[in-house]
Image (spheres, rainbow, N blue to C red):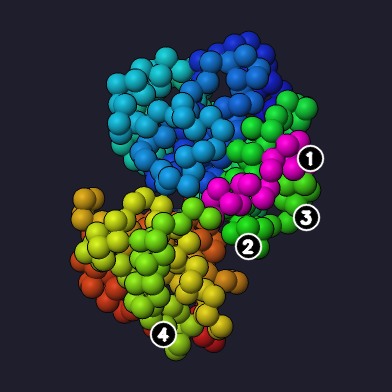
């Protein structure tokens, strides 16, 4: 990315829209709001638009109350997108990942800037800051501000937003993408006012009883295929309904399988009757690429060790399909 050109563009006030991927997670919300605080401090008229709803445990991140949800407030969102001079697309690598917003974004005349850490980025943006080695898009927003020589513009609110996404995308600083630089960034964010203990509590200690009981169902449904060092969980719509399922309630469940000794590959299959799909999350340890696996079999993608996808088959057919694919990966999963 030509940082001087970006600096030039940002030197006069502009209408700016910031978007992230469908079903926004901590990194999507944190990076978008962090960038929003930064651009606002430069005098821009910046608006954050998310494709759809996000979990309750993110509904306190500073600035969250002004996010426009495209699927609820479509007219307002479309007007903002049409009037935008610059559109930042954060934490996604392909416009199709913006769900229903895709059409609006494709016809926008704004200058596009992509900041993202997913594999195989598409080429819709004039400015691309893509780095698949990065822990999170939030860490990249920090480096973006750093490259623009503006770290002193990081307020406690901005620091909080960025801390949220680094923390959630690294599984609290444990995944392979967590480097010494990540820790230095996080240390600086604490120095600039991020309250790390409060952030952890706001994100992780807001369970409801029904959510914990749903986790119990997930544990009961957990299956291990030791021949392939693989574990998977399935949750039916009926099981979700019995536990007052809300968006975000199954966040992190896929990692349960990976915590079993020897397991290298974990999957969760979640039935979504409204969308008529089975939503799939995949995680791995080491060399096995769930990004490739998801691209090849489940219309998805993501990162080397964390990816997602979907299936139009029934829940049981999806699980059967998954199991039937594993033998061709035996050498990779259990050499
Ligand atoms: P999660 O399993 O937490 O939903 O997603 C894991 C990673 O895979 C995230 O980085 C997410 O952006 C990506 N991802 C999730 N679902 C999809 C999908 O359907 N398509 C693609 N390309 N990426 C996905
Ligand atoms: Mn991310």
Q: Distance between the residues labelled 4 and 1?
A: 46 Å
Query: How many residues crowd mark 2 within 10 Å: few (<14), some (14–19), many (20+)?
Result: few
* Labels 1 and 3: the sequence-earlier one: 3
Q: Nearer the viewer, mark 4 or mark 1?
A: 1
What residue occupies the far bottom of the structure in this picture?
Answer: 227
Give coordinates of residue 246: x percent, y percent.
Answer: 34, 51
- Membership of 72 in magenta stretch: no
Residue 175 is marked as 2
Q: In the rendered image, which residue does mark 1 sit on?
A: 191
Q: In the rendered image, which residue does mark 4 sit on?
A: 225
Q: Residue at x 60, y 30 (%)?
A: 35
Report helix, strand or loop for mark 1. Answer: helix
* Labels 3 and 4: the sequence-earlier one: 3
* Labels 2 and 3: the sequence-earlier one: 2
Instruction: State yes or no: Cβ of the residue under disc 1 lies below 8 Å from any atom of ligand 2.
Output: no
* Extent of the magenta region: 188-204
* Labels 1 and 2: the sequence-earlier one: 2
- Membership of 191 in magenta stretch: yes
Residue 93 can be seen, yes or no: no
């Amino acid at each position: 990315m030509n940082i001087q050109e970006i600096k030039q563009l940002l030197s006069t006030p502009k209408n700016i829209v910031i978007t992230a991927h469908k079903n926004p997670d901590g990194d999507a919300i944190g990076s978008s709001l962090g960038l929003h605080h930064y651009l606002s401090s430069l005098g821009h008229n910046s608006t954050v638009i998310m494709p759809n709803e996000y979990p309750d445990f993110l509904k306190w991140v500073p600035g969250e109350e002004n996010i426009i949800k495209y699927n609820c407030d479509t007219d307002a969102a479309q007007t903002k997108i049409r009037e935008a001079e610059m559109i930042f697309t954060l934490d996604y690598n392909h416009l199709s990942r913006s769900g229903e917003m895709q059409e609006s974004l494709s016809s926008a005349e704004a200058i596009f800037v992509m900041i993202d850490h997913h594999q195989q980025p598409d080429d819709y943006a004039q400015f691309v800051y893509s780095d698949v080695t990065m822990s999170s898009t939030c860490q990249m927003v920090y480096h973006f501000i750093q490259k623009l020589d503006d770290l002193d513009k990081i307020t406690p609110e901005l620091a909080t937003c960025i801390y949220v996404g680094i923390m959630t995308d690294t599984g609290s600083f444990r995944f392979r993408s967590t480097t010494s630089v990540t820790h230095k960034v996080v240390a600086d964010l604490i120095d600039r006012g991020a309250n790390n203990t409060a952030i952890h509590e706001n994100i992780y200690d807001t369970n409801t009883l029904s959510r914990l009981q749903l986790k119990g169902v997930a544990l009961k449904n957990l299956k291990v295929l030791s021949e392939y060092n693989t574990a998977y969980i399935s949750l039916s719509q009926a099981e979700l309904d019995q536990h007052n399922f809300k968006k975000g309630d199954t966040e992190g469940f896929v990692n349960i399988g990976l915590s079993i000794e020897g397991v290298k590959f974990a999957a969760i299959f979640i039935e979504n009757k409204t969308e008529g799909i089975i939503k799939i999350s995949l995680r791995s340890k080491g060399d096995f690429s769930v990004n490739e696996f998801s691209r090849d079999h489940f219309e998805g993608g993501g990162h080397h060790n964390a990816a997602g996808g979907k299936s139009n088959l029934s829940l049981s057919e999806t699980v059967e399909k998954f199991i039937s694919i594993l033998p061709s990966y035996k050498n990779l999963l259990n050499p």
